Structure formats: C-alpha cells, structure tokens
Image (cartoon, rainbow, N blue to C red):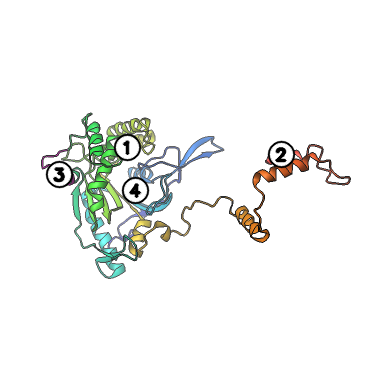
Amino acid sequence: MMYDAPVQGFLEVETPMMNIIPGGATAKPFETFHNDLKLPMFMRVAPELFLKQLVIGGMDRVYEIGRQFRNECIDLTHNPEFTTCEFYWAYQDYNDLMKITEEMVSGMIKGITGSYKITYHPDGMDKPPVEVDFTPPFKRISMVAGVQAGIRAKTNDPNFTIPPLSDAKTQGFLDALCTRLDVDCSAPRTTSRLLDKLVGEFIENDIIHPTFITDHPQLMSPLAKYHRSLPDMTERFELFVLGKEMCNAYTELNNPKVQRDLFADQSKSRDAGDDEAQKVDESFCVALEYGLPPTAGWGMGIDRMTMLLSGALNIKEVLLFPAMKPNENPSAKDAKDSKEQVSGTPAPTAAADKSAAAGSAAAPAPAGGDKSKKAGGKPKADKKKA
C-alpha cells in the first residue's frame, strides 16, 4: 500500500489514557481519581498533545491507533468510547494532507470494493440506496464562504455577509441570524457554537460525496495554525461523507505565545458554560517553547469508516460491546412477572414487603431461633447494608 506506515517511516507509539488535563479535542471528558497520587484525572479525549510532544522531541513521523473517551451523547454515529487513528508528520501542511487523504481513502475504497463508487442506504435498507463516488480529487468548500453561499440562496440576499469573527458584535449577529433562520443552538450560544450550527445546516447536511470543509475559524480551532492568507482563519480541513465527519486535520500551531492566548480564550468559553472547551495546558505550551517544526496532524474515526464500508446504519453494529443503558433490576422484575402469572394475583409491592418486614421484626423471636437476631430485629450489619 502507498501509505503503509512502516514504508513511510512512521513509528507506532502509545500515549497515556489518563491525563491531569483533558486536551487535544473540544469534548467533555470522563472524570476519575488516582487514589495514590490523590489527584483528579481524566480519561483522554484525544492523544494529540502527547503525539506533538514526541515530534518536538525529534520523532518526525508518529501515529497511534487507540481508544478515546468522550462523555457526550449516544446516537447513530457516536459512542462514548471509540477508536481513532492519528498521525503527525513533520514538514507537511494541510494542503499536503488533503492530497494524502484523497489518495489514501480513495485507494482503500477501491482496494476493498474494486471500485471508487459504493452504495449506501442512509435511510434504511427498505429505502433506495445512495451512490457515493470516492474518485479523487474531492470537492473543497471554504467554511465561512460556504455558509454565506447557503444563506444567500435561502434568503435570496446576494449581498449577505458574515461580519469579521474577531468583532465583538459578531456573536449577537449570529445569535439573531440563527433565531431568524430557525437554526437550533443550545446554550451557551457562543460565536463558535452558533457558527458550527450554521455549518451543519447549510453545508454538512447537503454533502453526499466526499468533501473537504476547509479554512475553519481560529476560534473554533485552538490547536490549528493561523491561515497564511485568510485573517481569523486556520489551515484546517474536515472530510465529510453523507453529512458525517470522517476525518479532521490541520497544520499544527507551533507558536507558544499564540497557543497560550487561544487556551485562555477557551477558558473564557468554559466560564461561560461550554463544558467542551479546552483547558489551559501549560506543560504543552512549555514543550512548544523548545520548538515544534512545521507539522501537520491527521485523525480519523475508524468505527465510522467501518460503518461506511460495511453498510451499517448504527455505530453499535460495528462495536462488539457498545454502550447500552442497562435495564433497572431486570431479575427482580422477571421474578415479579412470573409470580403474577402463576398465582393470578399481583405480587406484593415494595411497600407491602416493608410492612410485612416491620411486623416480623416486632414479633418476639421464637426460642432456639437465630441467635444473631435481637429484640430489634435484623442484626446491625444488615442495617448498615440497607
């Protein structure tokens, strides 16, 4: 294969699963506690910051395939724990990675299926299939320009323009715009969250064939490098297929001063109620001061790609042990139902059980009975368990 990792000089590594600071992605983490160190810790949401530190240390090409943990919703394409592949490549940028992604993904599709075109049933197996064409090159849409184009078409306003995102008034403009266009956005209605909902409404929902959404705003991409020619934007892209994100990549930010400032902005978003915003990771900023060479980073959710290739509609279909809400005390319920069926009368309720227990406890214990039972009823150990 053209992008076989050992052939390309990549080294597979493992990075910590638990962190003192959850970083590397905009996501809500799972919390835990280290008893010996007496420290609150977090399950990782991404391995990015550790992998970039390895590049700083001189390992120019590294990758990791591993589990990530995000304390977020469960739906058709999201599971709290999932598998990703991430790689970091020194002396590359996001333009290089778009070309690599096109060749790697289209080559994989053709190698597995024998064609660049596949069929998928996004609305269910009983509905007509959709043909998805992975023939390179993939379409590219600049994010803000694409949103503007979509809104102009919907409102018949050829002059509609989103104000500069660095302007303090832009948040109010986007807030009013989402309300007017009936685009839902839960609190906190920050500039980045409002824009993200508009992207979903006017770009993502219309994508069928593989498409790069590019040039994300800096306020949505605190780890990506600022764009060399577009103010307030970054050199970042996401690959979407059938309206779903398949991979995310960017030229890595390697300016420690700018990184600290962006982490500080993320902290303000957290204070405003955005529990997915990233925290300040000072140790990573110190590592950047030693010098991160020009680097590009790339990540893909393996489970979602497996869904696409296998025709699965639900991520649970490609996971051996997906997260499921357990039944509440199923054995007790089954026993109650069985008793009702045999006797023809309802089984005693919990309240009746308590009354019966209270009556038994009040009665004197028979001679020669259980020595552990005193006049007070059950032994103290049972009370403690209750």
Q: Position of residue 11 (x, y in %)?
A: 36, 54
**Residue on which the image places disc 2:** 383
User: Is the residue marked by circle 2 packed among few (<14), some (14-19), or many (20+) residues within 10 Å?
Assistant: few
Q: Considering only order in the chain, which callout, 2 or 1, is on the residue closer to the N terminus?
A: 1
Nearer to us in this view, 37 or 191 = 191
Q: Considering only order in the chain, which callout, 3 or 2, is on the residue closer to the N terminus?
A: 3
Q: Nearer the viewer, mark 2 or mark 4?
A: 2
In the image, 53: left or right of 242?
Answer: right
Which stretch is magenta?
148-161
**Residue on which the image places disc 1:** 288
User: Is the residue marked by circle 3 packed among few (<14), some (14-19), or many (20+) residues within 10 Å?
Assistant: some
Residue 59: image tag = 4
Quadrant of image for the N terminus? bottom left
Question: What is the CA distance from the residue labelled 4 to the residue labelled 3?
Answer: 47 Å
**Residue on which the image places disc 3:** 152
Quick check: can you spot residue 293?
Answer: no
Quadrant of image for the C terminus? top right
Q: Amino acid at mark 2?
A: Lys
Question: What is the CA distance from the residue labelled 1 to the residue labelled 4?
Answer: 14 Å
